[in-house]
Image (cartoon, rainbow, N blue to C red):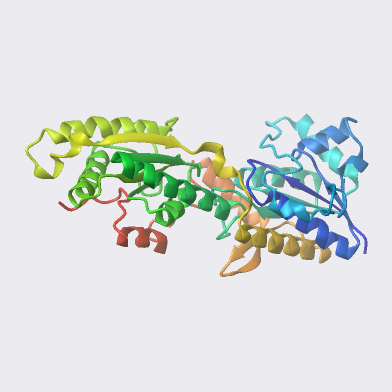
Amino acid sequence: MSKRIGILTSGGDCPGLNAIIRAVVKCSSQKGWDVYGIPYGTQGFLRLANGNCHSQDFELREHCYDLPGLLHGIDILQFLSGSILGSLSKGTSGDQAIADTIIRGYQDLKLDALIAVGGDGSLDIIYDLAQQGRWNIVAIPKTIDNDVPFTERSVGFDTAVDKVTSALYDLTFTAASHDRTIIIEVMGRNAGHLALSSGIAGGADVILIPELVPKIDEDLITNICLRIAQLRQSGRKFALVVIAEGVRNHAGERQKAIAEYLTTQINETSQKLSFTEKLEFCDLHKIETRSLILGHIQRSGTPSSYDRLLAATFAKKAADLIAEENYNQLVVWQNGEVQIQSLDKVVSHIKKRHQLGICPNPVDANGFLVQTAGSLGIYLGENPIPH
């Protein structure tokens, strides 16, 4: 049976969004369906309802992105970062008139189903609209933060880990050349998945994530200085510290440029400790500390092969669910395979966690990755370093 399906990307961009779009179009073409790409998330419905564009402007076909020469069709999309549809985090801001207009735009497009690609915040917003408008919706998780609940992996996370790991590799040599401690701040919002995975893969000496370090205090700074001192005493004059942006300052508040804040704290404390009578701190006055915020470079680059595979499998499952008319589902990755979770359950969990100010899918503080980091001698901040 022929269907008209829509696809939108919402929230922050990440590598793999275009790979999802490509796979959805290819799977749908095999079924004889028409696919419509909604520009800038739900704002595309708003534009359509307000008469600022036409439904044919949204149509996606296998050969709608031909390039000169030998490249034809949409296959090139799997290698491109960002989203050809555009992506916005903007919701309705509680304005029912805007919500009603978005719902009317969906109706005007005469869609049989919608594939929504987003993170936890986007899924929360789109779910509410879908409930009001009685949309047939299937969701695909994407975020470099990897904080969507009930899925072990979200599209974009693997590429971001590679990006940060590559940066740590490069920074190792400049840190070693100048005997410096370099503090690298990575994204993740309130989750430490990106910092933990990339820190382990990139050879960090210290990894600070909000699940293990609720806030920066004097004991933490002293222990970091001790870890740096131990490295220097062993003959290694440089160190790498990875800190997730969700770690809080001394007051337990969000701190802009938390890496710079930590750098200042380490510089001040190391100087004080170097003038104590404790031998382990005597060399600390020699350290130089620099900070670096990787920023949006973490969201860029060619999607990794894993993210492209994940995009393809998620898209295939989403198309299967639409064919079965099994709607209101989130496609997830669990136990090495694609599965589904009810959006009712997922969004209910997200809303409760957001109301409490808690990450919907935090790092397991007792999980194997945390244990692995500890076994490698990486200081995670949760325990004092033995003298």
Rendered position, 48 above or below 201: above
Question: Which quarter of the rendered picture does the N terminus lie within?
Answer: bottom right
Rendered position, 148 above or below 181: below
Q: Is residue 79 left or right of residue 213?
A: right
Q: Position of residue 126 (x, y in %)?
A: 71, 44
Q: Position of residue 318 (x, y in %)?
A: 75, 60
One can see residue 341 in this view: no
Q: Position of residue 326 (x, y in %)?
A: 77, 63
Q: Position of residue 231 (x, y in %)?
A: 23, 49
One can see residue 107 in this view: yes
Query: Residue 19 lies in what quarter of the image?
Result: bottom right
Please identify the residue farthest to the bottom as the structure is shown. 336
Q: Is residue 106 left or right of residue 120?
A: right
* Residue at the image point whose x is 69% and y is 64% from the top: 313
* Residue at the image point whose x is 31% and y is 35% from the top: 289
Query: Residue 33 lies in what quarter of the image?
Result: bottom right
Between residue 19 and residue 33, name the one nearer to us: 19
Between residue 185 and residue 252, name the one nearer to us: 185
* Residue at the image point whose x is 50% and y is 41% from the top: 189
Between residue 109 and residue 33, name the one nearer to us: 33
Q: Report how many numbered discs are placed on residues in the image.
A: 0
Please identify the residue farthest to the left as the structure is shown. 277
